[in-house]
Image: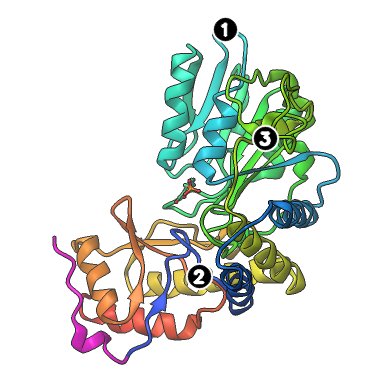
Amino acid sequence: MKLIVHLKFTMGIKMIYANTASIGRLSETTREEVSNFVNAYLKNDFYIDDYKIANEKKEQCRQIISQLFGNTFSSVLFFSSTTDALSILLSQLKLKKGSVIALPNNYFPSIEAIKLSFEKKNYELIEIGSSKGEINVDDLKNKKIDFLLIEWVNYWSGSKNNLKKLSQWCLKNNVIFAVDAVQGVGCCEIDFDIHEIDFFISAGHKWLRALEGSAFAIVSQRVSAYLEQIIYGYNSFSDKNNFDKKGREIETSLLRFELGTLSTVSFVSLFHAISELLENDHLKIAKKIRENSFALTDFLLGYGAIVHSPFNERDCTGIVSFTLPNIEPLEIYNRLLEFGVITKVRNDRIRVSPDITVDINELIQRIGLCLKGFL
Ligand SMILES: Cc1ncc(COP(=O)(O)O)c(C=O)c1O
């Protein structure tokens, strides 16, 4: 169905952006810092005479990511997207022939893509847990698993996995544990020990509210032995800044998995977005997002909507997913736009994902007005 926005409704109404699970909006401070950075290039006619500044900015960013996760010894590696990081790292995993890989029963296509590469290696793939992407320790018991890959928070249902319990079980049972964390970082409490996770992969452009092009992976030293490198970039060399050298050596640290030049401005935005998150206490922000999602969930249930995301405040994330009986999701989506609310249709449900700056009462009021027309 064609997307119809009735301008007579939306004209003059400030749109409420509730689609952070697709792409986050930069905060005022991050916007200012990005502008300052771009303006500095502009003044110099966009001439970059060396990459010193870029490297400094990237290292600052590595530091602040470490700080956010209380990371003292694992490696923070940079990539341009969650998908790139997942594919580049996990396609270079060398497990024993016939190893068993466990995946959730529902996931974003980034996991579908890495699944193809696992299939080519003749690993045995099993899908476990609920149809909303949840996996519990009980789903793992009595199964012979070598590698577990999950999403921290499922991309449409907003269901959150318990990383603490899962990582501890994996560690105890000698299972390599990888997490696509992009729907959790910046909106959920960091309630696990990052050192107990082997691959923790995320990006800046959703809940961290940075620019696209800023993704990272925190990789444990434990898995180094299982990574057999077959994809190299110029950053894989230990003497990467000596461009004319012949006979290069490969970097010995995990940084050898970083490939080429990344977008500095994206990492500048990520640095400032994380700084702000730390300044404002990320635990408080996560709690507020959870409370907001719970308030919206409660309201929707009261209205007779079918909610597909978690009902309990404790389990809520940034994503609220709902449908209305006998109404097409696209119809609801279009009508929400008329009321100045930007959401997304995912898995045939309306996915609402407002960031911390959205006035939750106003959002609920507008959704209520919109639903009145249907119920
Ligand atoms: C769970 C999950 N993983 C991966 C992605 C893709 O991330 P990226 O755009 O950084 O490749 C998304 C995007 O929505 C997602 O929700």
Q: Is mark 1 within 8 Å of ligand 1?
A: no
Residue at the image position 57 percent from the left and 7 percent from the top: 97
What residue would you read off at disc 3?
Answer: 235
**If you read the primary sequence from the N terminus, does the residue marked by circle 3 or circle 2 appear first?**
2
Mark 3 belongs to which amino acid?
Asn
In this view of the protein, can residue 218 be seen by the observer? Answer: yes
Give SS at disc 3: helix
What residue would you read off at disc 1?
Answer: 97
**Residue 128, image x, y percentages:** 49, 30
Q: Residue furthest right?
A: 72
Q: Nearer the viewer, residue 72 or 266?
A: 266
Q: Quarter of the image holding residue 335?
A: bottom left
**If you read the primary sequence from the N terminus, does the residue marked by circle 2 or circle 1 appear first?**
2
In this view of the protein, can residue 142 be seen by the observer? Answer: no
Q: Is residue 118 above or below residue 155?
A: above
Give SS at disc 1: loop
Q: Quarter of the image holding residue 350?
A: bottom left
What residue would you read off at disc 2?
Answer: 25
Disc 3 to disc 2, C-alpha distance: 31 Å
Crowding around mark 2 (Cα neighbors within 10 Å: few <14, some 14 to 19, many 20+) is many
Q: Is residue 215 left or right of residue 24?
A: right
Mark 2 belongs to which amino acid?
Arg
Query: Which part of the image, by quadrant, shows the N terminus?
Result: bottom left
Q: Nearer the viewer, mark 2 or mark 1?
A: 2
Q: How is the image coloured?
A: rainbow
Q: Quarter of the image holding residue 91?
A: top right
Crowding around mark 3 (Cα neighbors within 10 Å: few <14, some 14 to 19, many 20+) is some
Disc 2 to disc 1, C-alpha distance: 44 Å
